[in-house]
Amino acid sequence: MNSTNITEKLTDNVLAAYGNIENPRTQQIMKSLIQHLHGFIKDIQLSEPEWEYAWDFLARMAQFTSKDRNEFLLMADVLGASQLIEIMNHQRPSNSVGYALGGPFYRANAPLRARGTCTASDETTGKRVIITGTVINLADGKPISNATLDVWQAATNGFYENQDPAQPNMNLRGKFKTDDKGTYELIALLPTPYPVPTDGPVGELLRTAKRHPLRPAHIHFVVSAPEHETLVTQVFMADDEIIHTDAVFTASDNMVGNFIKDGDHYRLNYDFQLAEGESICPKAPIP
Ligand code: BEZ
Ligand code: FE
């Protein structure tokens, strides 16, 4: 038997060994995983030192993973896998705002804030942006009352409040409701770019690839309403150059807003469209 036949036989043996999984979806996933994993190893002719490097790299990723941080999820983000999964599972028409990954800093149970109030504490440095708009039904354009906008963002030092003991609990986070005309109003911080964590193996990869670690300035939104599919998105700034090189491949033209200067603050008008369907809220990585 030549070496190709020997390797093919091994792959076939492995596929057969995992061929009796009862759940059809699990069976399909395992079959494809084994085929792609073995195909990848053969394709690049993985050497022993490279294999040792790989499992050491994975072990180091595990060391950087805790209840507050998941280096594996961050790796999926910087490889574009997280955003690929989102856009594949939430295809939306080109005239509606795009679906974005939620990211590791989404936190459940943000406080419900009154219309027109600010998510930032008075001590939070940075310019403010008054954001107004309407939540509308994607199919017929009708406004959706009593929709919830769950908003969060980083401070100008690049840290979300849960990463930064200097910020009050739930700073720069809040939930807002639409009124009976489907409109909302809130005040947020003018967003600024910040780096993804680079002190672990993901940072090593970014440096190896000569990629910058920055996320373009953005504000996160989860927009939900009964009997409508939840929209997870991020709003970026129209003239931000970094949009084209987002460290996590999320920013795109269908998530851009016009932030207009108005004296000492900014204004943004931004509508969100929701498709009819089941209202399922994404799992928050931070409780
Ligand atoms: C964020 O935008 O919060 C984020 C997304 C992916 C990785 C790191 C941060
Ligand atoms: Fe973010």
Image (spheres, rainbow, N blue to C red):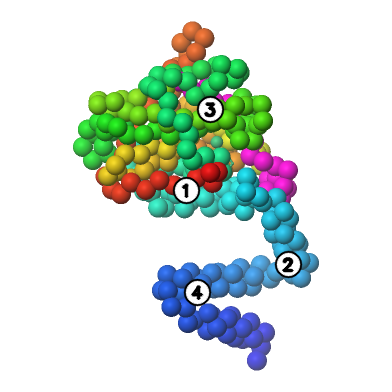
Please tell me how crowded label 2 is: few (under 14), some (14-19), or many (20+) other residues with Cα within 10 Å: few
**Which structural element holds mark 2?**
helix
Q: Nearer the viewer, mark 1 or mark 4?
A: 1
* Residue type (three-letter) at the residue carrying disc 1: Lys
Q: Which residues are magenta?
A: 187-206
Which tag, 4 or 2, sits closer to the chain's start? 4
Tell me if mark 3 has few (under 14), some (14-19) or many (20+) residues whose alpha carbon lies within 10 angstroms of its own: many
| Residue 277 locus on image (x, y percent) | 28, 48
- Who is closer to the viewer here, 83 or 23? 23
Q: CA distance from mark 4 to mark 2?
A: 22 Å
Residue highlighted by disc 4: 31
Amino acid on which disc 2 is placed: Trp
State how far apart marks 3 and 4 are (Cα). 44 Å
Helix, strand or loop at mark 1: loop
The residues tagged by marks 1 and 2 sit, at their Cα atoms, a distance apart of 34 Å
The answer to whether any part of residue 205 appears in the image is no
Image quarter where the N terminus lies is bottom right
| Residues at discs 3 and 1 in contact (Cβ within 8 Å) | no
Find residue 172 and name its label.
Answer: 3
Label 1 to label 4, Cα distance in Å? 28 Å
Q: Which residue is mark 2?
A: 51
Marks 1 and 4, the one that precedes in the sequence: 4
Compute the Cα span from label 3 to label 2. Answer: 43 Å
Residue 190 colored in magenta in the image: yes
